[in-house]
Amino acid sequence: MPRERHVRNYDRQMAHQVVNLREAFATFREHWSPRIAAELNGQQVKLVKFQGEFVWHSHEHEDEMFLVHKGSFRMEFRDRAVEVRAGEFLVVPRGVEHRPVAPEEVEVILFEPASTLNTGNTRNERTVRELKRL
Ligand code: NI
């Protein structure tokens, strides 16, 4: 099925459906493997669990929003780091190198364009090209 048609069908299915975050996060356990929860206006809402250190990377064309649902993590930049806790969010502007680090498991909602690759300009074993849907 052409991707555009697939996306349209998916949008229609998801429209008007309430997403319960606690239940949605309970459907998977893998770390660093974002799940697509919804799409709107060319953006995707992704749910992801982190634990440990991710890779340094940046996204040339995409800003990324990280909203913490449960737990907390540290977002490292080359010149500083910030802690992001449950109920808080952070937007990482395009082009800015960043690395999420979570000493303990954290549940995060990502909001970013559908084209965004999780490891940005870096490719390694954490790179996920085909995201699963909830
Ligand atoms: Ni990123």
Image: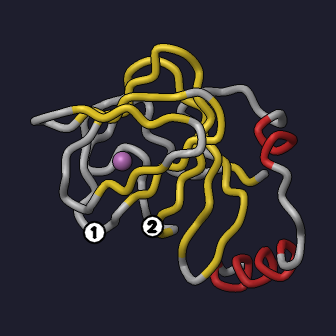
Seen from the viewer's position, the closer of residues 87 and 113 is 87
Q: Marks 2 and 1, how far apart in space? A: 9 Å
Q: Earlier in the sequence, mark 2 or mark 1?
A: 1
Seen from the viewer's position, the closer of residues 76 and 129 is 76
Secondary element at tag 1: loop
| Badge 1 amino acid | His
Residue 34 position by quadrant: top right
**Quick one: quadrant of the N terminus?**
bottom right
- Residue 56 in picture, x, y percent from top left: 25, 34
Q: Are marks 2 and 1 in contact (CB under 8 Å)?
A: yes
- Residue 88 in picture, x, y percent from top left: 51, 46
Secondary element at tag 2: loop
* Disc nearest the viewer among 2 and 1: 1
Residue 61: give its label. 1
| Badge 2 amino acid | Ser
Neighbor class of circle 2 (other Cα within 10 Å; few <14, some 14-19, many 20+) is: few
**Residue for point 47% across, 50% down:** 89
**Residue for point 27% across, 60% down:** 93
Seen as rendered, the residue at the extreme left is 79
**Residue for point 24% across, 32% down:** 81
- Would residue 133 be found to the left or right of residue 88 on screen? right
**Residue for point 54% across, 53% down:** 110
Residue 115: give its label. 2
Residue 53 position by quadrant: top left
- Residue 23 in picture, x, y percent from top left: 87, 41
